[in-house]
Structure formats: C-alpha cells, structure tokens
Image (spheres, rainbow, N blue to C red):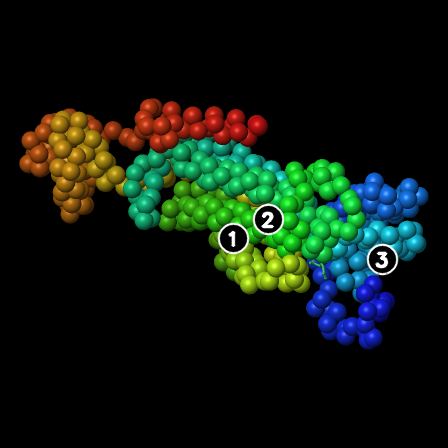
Amino acid sequence: MAEKVWQKRFSQPLDPRVHDLNRSLGFDNWLAPYDLQVSTVWARALNRCGLLSEKDLKAILQGLKDIGAEFEQGEFELHEADEDIHMAIERRLGELIGEPARRLHHGRSRNDQVATDLRLYALDHAGKIRQALREVITALVELAGEHTGTPFPGHTHLQQAQVLSLGHLLLAHAWSLKSDNEFLDRVKQVTSVCPLGSAALGGSTAPVDREWIASELGFAAPSDNSVEAVASRDFVMDLLYGLSRTGVHLSRLAEDFILWNSQEFGFVTLADTVATGSSLLAHKKNPDMFELIRGKSGRLVGNHTGFLATVKGLPSGYNKDLQEDKEPLFDSVDTVLQLLPALEVTLRGVTFNVERIAAQLSPYLKAERIVQYLTGRGVAFREAYGIAGSLVKEAESQAVALEDLPVKVFQKASPSFEEDILTVLESDWEIPAEGVMGGSNRKSVEQQLKQLRDWIKR
Ligand code: ARG
C-alpha cells in the first residue's frame, strides 16, 4: 500500500484493518466537486497573500480542473491507499503536476477543508430539495384546485368529524410542505458560514483574507471562531432535522392516501403507472409508492436522531467521530430527492371518486346543522348541542338518518324546531361560499390557492 502523507512520523505502517475503518473514501467521494472548488479558492488565497507563485498557482488550478474533468467522465481512480477524498485529490494532483501540488495544503487542515466542503454540499442540496418540494406542492395545489367544492369527510380520531372541502384538506398537506421548504431556507442561512482558514482548530498560520475566501465560495460570511468552525456540525443536525420533519409530513400525507385507496374507503383510484401488482394475488393493485414514502420516513428520523447521538459528548475541536456526519446526511438527502419526484408523479396519477365519497359521508354529520339551526333561533350552544346529541342517539337507535325522524320527535326535543328542520337536513352537502378566514369555505380555499400559486412563482 502506498505511503501515507503522515508516514514519516511513524515507524510502522498502518494495519490494513485499521485503515479500512479509518477510510471514508467509500462514501465521501460525493464531496469531490466541492473539494475541488474549495482547493481552487484556497490556492488563489495563498497566491494573494504571497505564499504561492503565479506559476505554481497556474499549475495547481490546471491540475484541479483536469481532476474535475476526470470525475465528470467517471475516470478518476480511487486508490485503495487513499484515506479520504481530500487525500485522493491531493495524491492525484501530485501525479499530474508534481512539486507545486505539495504547496497547496499550506496553512490548511482537512478539518476546515471537510467542514467547508460539507457546508457547500448542504447548501447545494438543500436548494435542490426546496425545488423538489415546490414541485410536489404544485401538484397538490393543482389537485386541490379541482376540488375546492368537493365535500369530503374530515376525520378526527379517524372518525368522521366534519364535512370539509377536499381542496382544503389537500392544501393542509401543501402548507406543511411549504413550511418544510421555508425551514430549509433557514437552514441554508445558518449553513452559509465559511470555516476555511480555521485550519486544524486554532486558525490558519497563512495570512489569508478570510472575507475574500468566504465570498469567493459564495458564503454569507467567514466563521467567527476557529475551534467552533471545525467541530460544529450544527448545520448537519439542522438539515437532518429539516429532512426528518419533511419525512414525517410526507408520511402523514402518504397514510391518508393509503387509507383512501383501501376498498373500505374507496375514495381514490391510482393510475396504473403509479401502482404495483402482487406476485400471487391476481386482483391486487397496491399503493406501494405511498407505502415506501411512509416507510422511508423512518430512516430520515433515524439519521437525524442517530447523528445527534454521535455528536453528543464529543470534546471540543475536531474528533474523527465527525466523519460519521456524511453517511446519514447523504442518505437523507438522497432519500428525500428520490421520494419527492416519485410523490409528485403519484399525486398526478390520483383520481378522487367523488360519488363514492359523497355516499360514504355519515348521515350524523348533519348534527352540526341542528346545532346551527337551534343557535340561530336563540338556543344556547350547550343546550343546542345536547339536543342534537340526543337526536343522533335516537336516529342511531332506529338506524335511520336524522331527516328520517318525524318532526314531532324534533319538537319533543325542543320547542324551537319547526317543520323546516327537515328541509335543512335533507339538502345535500355543499361547501359554503363564505366563512371564516383559513376555514373550509370556498372563499378561503380560493384565497389559499392564490397564496400558494403566488408563492410557487416566486
Ligand atoms: N475524512 C475526514 C472527515 O470526514 C476528514 C478530516 C480528517 N481530519 C483529521 N484530522 N484526521 O472528517
């Protein structure tokens, strides 16, 4: 195995089993484009403060560019002896340009290097995820726009509670995902701090211009404390949390659709392009996409909580434990970036079975109308509520709908009832045109659609 850069400090080579555990190259090659970007700016920063000649700078920049092309073409070779992506790139740079490559790491440590690389990765991918969320929200808004006036059973305790506009219910999911999108924007803000120039932990010995470095790399500012800069993975925790909360929201959405797709509900039909069959039961058509979304949210939560446990208890400064930041982060990012487009296309393949939904509305949901009728005639709410409850009990014991009870039963329950109560109860469900802001009335749903459409365009 090739010699380690630090081998001169040691009298014996590293045991291969220890090397295997130490090595992060199996997963950190994701960082290659960011590492090349960071090294490019670092070389220029050294040149600006007189630590690297124009000639060496030119050679380094060309070498880094060539390495970038090798990665793009899938030609970059990882060597068994390379410890991580940073050492692999340094090794390759040496092979390509020789001596100047040995000047690049002046005043820098892998500690500030990896922290900077990973922040760039996080910023880039948080942006990609925000865009993918926006597309799912768009699909939800389009579906909701078709159903602003569709009466739908709203559940609490998984019991039919109130008739809602289906559009309103679908938008509830859109709002949750919008809040995830905005959370990720806040994560981007806290991530946009540049550790480069912090070196191992005490700050670089090279008199580099850290403001310039930060701005060249697109960060909002350089970090304020070198010890914190190399040891902090707050941005990883925040991004993992952002992705786990997204996962939780996606899972709840998926659960709604899984229920609605069951024979018992029968509220939705999935397009053949987004459902799957069974290897044994010939009639099956399964909502696997929604189940996988629900299932994979588990690992998003696990990656977040697992990483909190990794960081808890670490002493100040960089510790190798921090190398464990990458796999959970990359896994969560990849998972969410896989789920969101699949969800978008699945939502576009959903049809709501409006007649079946109407037929499944419990007749006793109309108890709300009785309460409104009575309070409209001056009966105190609690009184009206009790009367409505007793009428539901009566209708249920006779296994009939409320409007099938004779008027005299109503009038026995309260003298405020007149004949017209039956007309009130018989009419079909309609989503009211007006009502409280943020409620399930058409005006509010239209208002929400407008807000979300404007937001999507921004
Ligand atoms: N591969 C390492 C990581 O991911 C890079 C930093 C190594 N630093 C060190 N002092 N050994 O964290």
Q: Indicate the quadrant of ligand 1 in the picture.
A: bottom right
Earlier in the chain: of badge 3 and badge 1, it is 3
Say which amino acid is labelled 3: Arg
Please give the label number shown on residue 453. Answer: none
Earlier in the chain: of badge 1 and badge 2, it is 2
Quadrant in the rendering for residue 14? bottom right
Q: Which residue is mark 1?
A: 297
Residue 240: percent from left, percent from top = 56, 51
Q: Quadrant of the C terminus?
A: top right
Q: Which residue is mark 3?
A: 91
Residue 276 visible? no
Q: Nearer the viewer, mark 1 or mark 2?
A: 2
Label 3 Cα neighbours within 10 Å, binned few <14 / some 14-19 / many ≥20: some
Earlier in the chain: of badge 2 and badge 3, it is 3
Within 8 Å: ligand 1 and the Cβ of disc 1?
no
Q: Viewed as shown, does residue 425 lie left or right of 346?
A: left
Q: Residue at x 71, y 39 (%)?
A: 211
Residue 124: percent from left, percent from top = 66, 42
Q: Residue at x 64, y 42 (%)?
A: 192
Q: Residue at x 77, y 62 (%)?
A: 83
Q: Secondary structure at mark 2?
A: helix
Q: Quick check: marks 3 and 1 in contact, CB under 8 Å?
A: no
Residue 420: percent from left, percent from top = 15, 26
Within 8 Å: ligand 1 and the Cβ of disc 3?
no
Distance between the alpha carbons at the discs numbered 2 and 3: 29 Å
Please give the label number shown on residue 235. Answer: 2
Say which amino acid is labelled 2: Phe
Residue 386 visible? yes
